[in-house]
């Protein structure tokens, strides 16, 4: 079983448009340490505006869906890098099982590519894995 690592305040920026996925994420994020803050944005366009306006300090990690309305995750990725730099890790959390998408994510330097699980226990494990990536420094 994956257990959350201890950390100071952690901010997750989650860019996801599916209401069911958002509900599951919120459910399992509540089980993480109380010092975890989640910001949800529902479209690539909303995320672009949010990032360009720098409304808050940099998050500890960005959770990025690929299949977003108006601006896909891959289209949004360069905007993330241009506004936040390379220090903020990005995790793809998508229903896409495409090897092409996985390779593209790896080539871009995205730290992890997680396929959205089809059962709730695996969903919970995915949220813990994302949290642990946020609090644990990523080896270059």
Image (cartoon, rainbow, N blue to C red):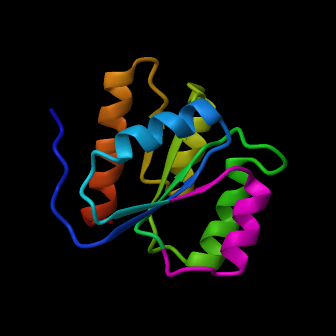
92 versus 117 height, above or below: below
Q: Quadrant of the N terminus?
A: top left
23 versus 98 height, above or below: below
Query: Where does the magenta region start and end?
Result: 39-58
**Is residue 9 visible to us here?**
yes
Query: Residue 41: x percent and y percent?
Result: 65, 56
User: Magenta stretch containing residue 51, yes or no?
Assistant: yes
Image point 66% across, 73% down: which residue? 51
Image point 68% across, 49% down: which residue? 73
The quarter holding residue 5 reads: bottom left
Q: Is residue 7 left or right of residue 15?
A: left
Query: Residue 72: x percent and y percent?
Result: 74, 47
Image point 31% across, 23% down: which residue? 121
Looking at this view, name the residue that lies furthest to the top. 119
The quarter holding residue 67 reads: top right
Q: Is residue 87 left or right of residue 105?
A: left
* Front-lying residue, 107 or 138: 138
105 versus 102 height, above or below: below
Q: Is residue 59 left or right of residue 47?
A: left
Figure disc tally? 0
* Front-lying residue, 113 or 51: 51
User: Magenta stretch containing residue 65, yes or no?
Assistant: no
């Amino acid at each position: 079983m994956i257990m959350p690592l201890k950390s100071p305040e952690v901010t997750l920026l989650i860019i996801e448009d599916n209401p069911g996925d958002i509900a599951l994420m919120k459910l399992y994020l509540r089980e993480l340490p109380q010092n975890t803050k989640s910001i949800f944005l529902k479209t690539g366009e909303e995320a672009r505006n949010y990032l360009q306006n720098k409304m808050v300090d940099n998050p500890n990690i960005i959770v990025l869906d690929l299949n977003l309305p108006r601006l896909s995750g891959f289209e949004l990725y360069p905007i993330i890098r241009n506004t936040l730099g390379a220090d903020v890790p990005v995790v793809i959390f998508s229903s896409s099982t495409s090897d092409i998408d996985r390779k593209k994510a790896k080539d871009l330097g995205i730290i992890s590519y997680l396929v959205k699980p089809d059962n709730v226990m695996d969903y919970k494990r995915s949220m813990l894995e994302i949290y642990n990536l946020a609090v644990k420094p990523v080896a270059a």
